[in-house]
Image: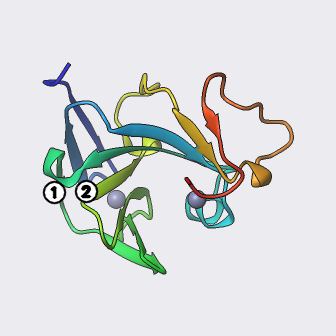
């Protein structure tokens, strides 16, 4: 459904996000950087092209190599990542208003860091490190 619109934002409401159309892909990342960013055991995200994403409000970001991780400077909620060299926006599933989001992970990254109590997502491609 090309006309699907999803909305999200941070806990305090100063940043709002609108996502038009279905994501290009959906994934989980278990890497150390994503664990620290979210404060959780893994990060769940979905990727849209920047042309399908609108962001209202100021974000702050922290850069790990070519990877810019945006969050709300007022409440600290993680929101999305952008990367040098592409126009994709990796939106944190936890930033979406609808929970559950209904989006299913296509793949998992850094499975070698996955907590032992967590099972692989059925049908999702499994990568020990980054996406090949
Ligand atoms: Zn906020
Ligand atoms: Zn990661």
Residue 91 at x, y percent in the picture: 37, 49
Q: Which image quadrant shows ligand 1?
A: bottom left
Quadrant in the picture for residue 35? bottom right
Q: Return the residue nearer the eye: 131 or 48.
A: 131
Residue under numbered circle 2? 15
> Which residue: 19% across, 62% down?
57
* Real-space CA distance between mark 1 and mark 2, rounded to the nearest whole angstrom: 6 Å
Residue under numbered circle 1? 56
In the displayed structure, does residue 75 sit left or right of residue 15?
Answer: right
Q: Are marks 1 and 2 in contact (CB under 8 Å)?
A: yes
Q: Of label 1 and label 2, which has the lower sequence position?
A: 2
Residue 11 seen from this side: no
Q: Return the residue nearer the eye: 115 or 22.
A: 22
- Label annotation for residue 112: none
Disc 1 element = strand
The residue most toward the right is 116
> Which residue: 31% across, 55% down?
89
Residue 46 seen from this side: yes
Q: Is mark 2 within 8 Å of ligand 1?
A: yes
Disc 2 element = loop
Residue 7 at x, y percent in the picture: 25, 37
Quadrant in the picture for residue 118? top right
């Amino acid at each position: 459904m090309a006309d699907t619109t999803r909305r999200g934002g941070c806990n305090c409401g100063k940043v709002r996000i609108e996502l038009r159309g279905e994501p290009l892909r959906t994934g989980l990342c278990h890497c150390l950087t994503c664990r620290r960013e979210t404060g959780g055991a893994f990060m769940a995200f979905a990727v849209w092209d920047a042309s399908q994403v609108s962001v209202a409000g100021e974000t702050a970001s922290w850069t790990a190599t070519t990877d810019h991780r945006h969050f709300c400077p007022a409440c600290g909620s993680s929101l999305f990542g952008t990367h040098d060299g592409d126009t994709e926006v990796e939106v944190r599933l936890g930033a979406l208003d609808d929970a559950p989001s209904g989006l299913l992970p296509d793949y998992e990254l850094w499975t070698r860091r996955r907590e032992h109590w967590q099972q692989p997502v059925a049908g999702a491609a499994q990568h020990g490190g980054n996406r090949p």
